[in-house]
């Protein structure tokens, strides 16, 4: 089983989420993640915004991976949202984003951060895998997609 499959939990998954814009998405993700991670929501939003200021985390193909490093975070966490409708994310291919993976890692977890980003990129490079996520009827199907897929 890959690292993502161990980190992605049904409680970290939302399907058909509706948000107005990128900052609204960051705030929503932070509100969901903060109580689960024991980190203030403001810190999570700030970490997403700081990374986004370096360039869009919209990779293209309808995918975005906002990510951040947080002081005080003990373990890495992954959250998934399928957006409906898709959202302008200033992606590399200018397409709107509907599949969002938010990755949060401890401030000092450089190697883990890169490993998880690499795993996500490998999975999401597959059109068939992205379609499985787009068609997933529930959170369990999203987790299963990672559990049965090879990165």
Image: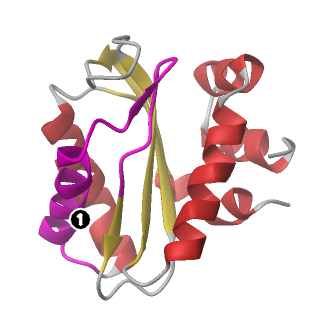
Disc tally is 1
Q: Which residues are magenta?
A: 39-67
What's the colour scheme?
secondary structure
Q: Which residue is mark 1?
A: 44
Q: Quadrant of residue 103?
A: bottom left
Q: Is residue 147 above or below residue 43?
A: above
Relative to 65, 10 lies left or right = right
- SS state under label 1: helix
Q: Quadrant of residue 125?
A: top right
Q: Is 86 or 105 nearer to us in this picture?
A: 105
Asked whether 64 falls inside the magenta stretch, the response is yes
Relative to 65, 56 lies left or right = left
Q: Report the residue at 71% width, 24% height from top.
A: 132
Q: Report the residue at 60% width, 42% height from top.
A: 139
Q: Report the residue at 73% width, 26% height from top.
A: 129
Q: Is residue 24 visible?
A: yes
Q: Report the residue at 52% width, 66% height from top.
A: 113
Q: How crowded is the residue under tag 1: few (<14 C-alpha within 10 Å), some, or many (20+)?
A: many
Residue 11 in the image, given as x and y percentages of width and height: 51, 57
Residue 136 in the image, given as x and y percentages of width and height: 65, 26
Residue 123 in the image, given as x and y percentages of width and height: 71, 38
Residue 12 in the image, given as x and y percentages of width and height: 49, 55
Q: Is residue 31 above or below residue 93?
A: below
Rendered-image quadrant of the N terminus: bottom right
């Amino acid at each position: 089983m890959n690292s993502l499959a161990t980190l992605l939990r049904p409680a970290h998954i939302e399907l058909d989420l509706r948000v107005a814009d990128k900052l609204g998405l960051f705030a929503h993700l932070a509100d969901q993640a903060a109580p689960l991670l024991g980190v203030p929501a403001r810190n999570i939003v700030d970490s997403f915004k700081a990374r986004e200021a370096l360039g869009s985390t919209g990779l293209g193909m309808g995918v975005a991976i906002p990510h951040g490093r947080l002081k005080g975070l003990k373990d890495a966490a992954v959250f998934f949202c399928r957006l409906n409708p898709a959202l302008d994310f200033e992606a590399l291919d200018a397409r709107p984003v509907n599949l969002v993976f938010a990755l949060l890692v401890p401030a000092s977890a450089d190697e883990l951060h890169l490993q998880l980003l690499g795993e996500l990129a490998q999975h999401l490079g597959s059109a068939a895998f992205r379609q499985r996520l787009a068609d997933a009827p529930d959170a369990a199907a999203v987790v299963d997609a990672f559990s049965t897929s090879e990165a």
